[in-house]
Amino acid sequence: MSETRVRFAPSPTGYLHVGGLRTALYNFLFARKNNGKFILRIEDTDRNRYVEGAVENLIESLKWCGLDYDEGPDKAGEFGPYMQSQRLDIYKKYADDLIAKEHAYFCFCTPERLQTLKEEQAAQKLPQAKYDKHCLSLSKNEIEDKLANGIPHVVRLNVILNQKIIFDDIIRKRVEFESNNVDDQVLIKSDGYPTYHMANVVDDHMMQISHVIRGEEWLSSTPKHVLLYDFFGWEKPIFAHLPLLLNPDRSKLSKRQGDVAVEDYRAKGFLKEALVNFVALLGWNAGNDKEFYYMNELIESFSLERVNNSGAVFDFEKLNWINAEHLRKKSNEELLTLLKFEIENSELRIENYSDSYLLQIIDAMKERVNFVKEYLTKSPYFFEAPTEYEEASRLKNWKPETPEQLVVLKNKFTQLNNPSKEDYETVLKQAASELNISAGKLIHPLRLALSGISTGPGMYDLLFILGKGEVINRINTALNTLR
């Protein structure tokens, strides 16, 4: 195959799992690095698990992350359609071809017989349940009679026994399976829909997929796919099976232990650049200590040879750190757009503040927030005057003499005309000197009066951003409230 062509082929069973995002990302990076094509194909042949709206959710999540595919359900391409449910005639044609060559066969066994067989094999303590090829021995006449009478049936792969199935994997190297351990996999179900195994091999061949990059959970299924390629006489793609994603306790990452959907992290306020950066590092590194990447840097650095073959631990603290780093490297103008969106969707009663006002808040708080929403949650006092005051700070900083001292300071603020940050600093230090106290004796209760809490940006930044009128109003409110 002269062109690099890779695909991400999710099932529309709900949200986009972060493991699915990693698979999609690695395919995307590999395609872009090699000037190839990245294809989105929807594997919707399991109708029992199909979730309405899941396809739209998958597409939206991929596009939000910046994984723009070249061909897919909503994009023209010469190898479509890209929804497997629209390709059933294709699978039937190839299944008939396998049956004609005796590489597959009709199976009419009832669910009851299959369950009994499974229980018998479990009683014998066999390592895995396998179909016993019972229907392979049916005569041609028996098969035709059953088909003519509409007896429910499936089509099974005819695995040849006592063979070694060998294939190469970029990440796993040489992989070998005994065919005796490979089941006669169902290829076409009784409803006429193909299983993943049949549809995936046919589609990968017809769509000229050069590299199959997917999760480790599909490694044990690959022998069935290799057999199908051989039975059809088709060239096999190059395989690369990615390591599992693990919780910190090294159990498999699952929703039982926390969020696993891309939409969950988006809703929590993680930046798409940060999530992509973090997910890229789950099993891959460029051979150095670099951990901060933009997408173009990931494309330039990525290679499948640098993907590990052991499980990758999902470190939530590292994700938080990466998000904070990406946030701080954004320009104030970029953050302004994000903050305005956050304000529009906030439950706070926030007025129409000017861009210049918001930019001042962004600059003052930039080193103190890890998420855009924290401009609101960590500094709500920029948008609403405090109505409550932090008890610990009140007990520590609001002394009997504090009201008299703040009145002196307030009177000096009142005399200022269009004050700068430097003007506020000069006046506060003058007031402290006249009162014969340290500046801190004024700064701490003043911060409490203005913000209701004991932490925040520099005091003179806070004074300048709020403005003289608002500062005086808040001091008055505190003097009337904190007695």
Image (cartoon, helix red, strand yellow):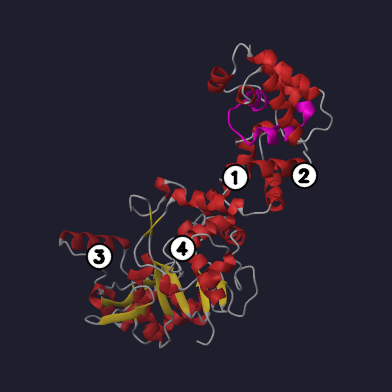
> From mark 3 to mark 4, how far is it between C-alphas?
22 Å
Secondary structure, mark 1, is: helix
Depicted 208 relative to depicted 307: above or below: below
Picture quadrant where residue 97 is located: bottom left
Q: Position of residue 164 (x, y in %)?
A: 25, 81
Q: Earlier in the sequence, mark 1 or mark 4?
A: 4
Closer to the camera in the image, 247 or 194: 247
Give the CA separation, mark 2 to mark 4: 50 Å
* Residue at disc 3, secondary structure: loop
Residue that label 4 marks? 46
**The magenta stretch spans which residues?**
446-470
Q: Determine the CA span between mark 2 and mark 3.
A: 66 Å
Instruction: Between label 2 and label 3, give the one nearer the viewer.
Output: 2
| Distance from Cα at disc 2 to Cα at disc 1 | 19 Å
- The kind of residue on which mark 1 rests is Glu
Residue 129 is marked as 3
The residue lying at 16 percent from left, 61 percent from top is 125
Disc 1 versus disc 3: nearer the observer: 1
Q: Residue at x 60, y 70 (%)?
A: 69
Residue 367, numbered label: 1
